[in-house]
Image (cartoon, rainbow, N blue to C red):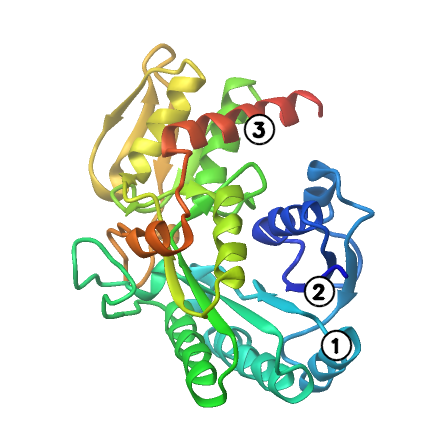
């Protein structure tokens, strides 16, 4: 008999890739979304699974809605990928962020404990929880120091997941995923903003892109590989928490340079801080500038993950470095823009 998986936030990047993976393994996939309609159905179309996922309406703010969904579907595995996931927005909407990202997880865990206690539960934790880092490389034992309402809410939900595991003997696990990107990333996220923006400049559809902190360093991996890690966590004999990361990082500025190289644009930098600009050497035009609007009130300057535990216990390894990832995303964006 095939397993049934419930994926919250199913129409996002990770939800789409995870759906495709689980479908390939014979699962029945039920996905939930807080929005009615099909605003983000393009990801399913991109992966060719548009008619294979049973999408339902569910909101993590609504206890009755969640209870009904768990009671009706009786899932074998629940992957909680739903969140108010924009760090910058969380400073403007801290209450909503905490209600969804923190209390929403409690509502979901309680529904599972009440109506399907043998279901396995995956919580999407995040490297943002490390914030003002305490160690050069962050692993499962590194203390958290969150620097945004989003990260604070995620720390709460992370420890609630641990608490339900230890208090009620439930199979609950958290994936502490470092930044993971793909052609399915939303345009509001910096890597896709860069690859899509540089592709648009290359095709003459745009003059420049505006970014925030160019010096921020992140550990960027490929989302398609990271959802395999999620699934492996849920198949292990015992539940636990795992960091998924590449163990390498680069600055936002370097990611821009990589995309420009793919576009055959020679970029040179002038100025510092918010006055810094990226200039196309051949034309002399500014193609990248910086705005304080994209800086966070409390910046996270550097993140670098240590996935040794996942390597050893789950036999999970990333295979796509940030250069290959940039090429994958840029190539997809060029092709997408040419079809417009």
Residue underneath mark 2: 32
Where residue 47 sits, quadrant-wise, is top right
Where residue 151 sits, quadrant-wise, is bottom left
Looking at the image, residue 291 sits to the left or right of residue 93; the answer is: left
> For the residues carrying marks 3 and 2, which lies nearer the camera in this image?
2
**Badge 2: residue crowd in 10 Å (few <14, some 14–19, many ≥20):** many
Looking at the image, residue 160 sits to the left or right of residue 99; the answer is: left
Q: Which residue is most to the top?
A: 282
Tell whether label 1 touches label 2 (CB within 8 Å).
yes
Residue underneath mark 3: 333
Looking at the image, residue 85 sits to the left or right of residue 292; the answer is: right
Residue underneath mark 1: 69
Tell whether label 2 touches label 3 (CB within 8 Å).
no
Tell whether label 3 touches label 1 (CB within 8 Å).
no
Q: Which residue is most to the right?
A: 51
**Badge 3: residue crowd in 10 Å (few <14, some 14–19, many ≥20):** many
Q: Earlier in the sequence, mark 2 or mark 1?
A: 2
Which residue sits at x=83%, y=47%?
51
**Badge 1: residue crowd in 10 Å (few <14, some 14–19, many ≥20):** many
Q: Position of residue 139 (x, y in %)?
A: 27, 59
Where residue 10 sits, quadrant-wise, is bottom right
Which residue sits at x=65%, y=89%?
114
The N terminus - image quarter:
bottom right
Label 1: which secondary element = helix
Label 3: which secondary element = helix
């Amino acid at each position: 008999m095939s397993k049934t998986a419930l994926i919250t936030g199913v129409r996002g990047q990770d939800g789409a890739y995870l759906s495709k993976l689980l479908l390939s393994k014979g699962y029945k996939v039920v996905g939930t979304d807080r929005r009615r309609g099909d605003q983000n159905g393009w990801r399913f179309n991109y992966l060719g699974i548009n008619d294979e996922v049973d999408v339902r309406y569910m909101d993590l703010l609504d206890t009755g809605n969640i209870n009904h969904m768990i009671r009706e579907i009786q899932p074998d595995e629940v992957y909680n990928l739903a969140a108010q996931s924009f760090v910058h927005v969380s400073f403007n909407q801290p209450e909503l962020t905490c209600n969804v990202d923190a209390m929403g997880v409690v509502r979901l865990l309680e529904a599972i404990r009440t109506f399907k206690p043998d279901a396995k539960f995956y919580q999407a934790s995040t490297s943002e929880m490390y914030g003002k880092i305490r160690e050069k490389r962050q692993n499962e034992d590194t203390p958290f120091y969150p620097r945004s309402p989003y990260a604070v809410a995620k720390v709460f939900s992370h420890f609630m997941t641990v608490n339900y595991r230890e208090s009620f003997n439930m199979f609950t696990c958290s994936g502490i995923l470092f930044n993971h990107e793909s052609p399915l990333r939303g345009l509001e996220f910096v890597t896709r903003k860069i690859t899509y923006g540089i592709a648009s400049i290359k095709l003459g559809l745009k003059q420049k892109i505006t970014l925030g902190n160019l010096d921020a360093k992140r550990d960027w991996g490929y989302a398609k590989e990271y959802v395999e890690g999620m699934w492996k966590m849920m198949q292990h004999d015992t539940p636990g928490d795992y960091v998924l990361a590449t163990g390498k990082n680069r600055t936002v500025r370097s990611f821009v340079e990589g995309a420009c190289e793919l576009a055959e644009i020679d970029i040179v930098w002038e100025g510092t801080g918010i006055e810094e600009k990226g200039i196309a050497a051949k034309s002399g035009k500014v193609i990248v500038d910086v705005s304080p609007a994209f800086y966070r009130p409390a910046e996270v300057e550097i993140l670098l993950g240590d996935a040794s535990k996942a390597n050893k216990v789950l036999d999970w390894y990333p295979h796509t470095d940030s250069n290959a990832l940039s090429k994958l995303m840029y190539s997809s964006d060029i092709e997408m823009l040419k079809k417009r």
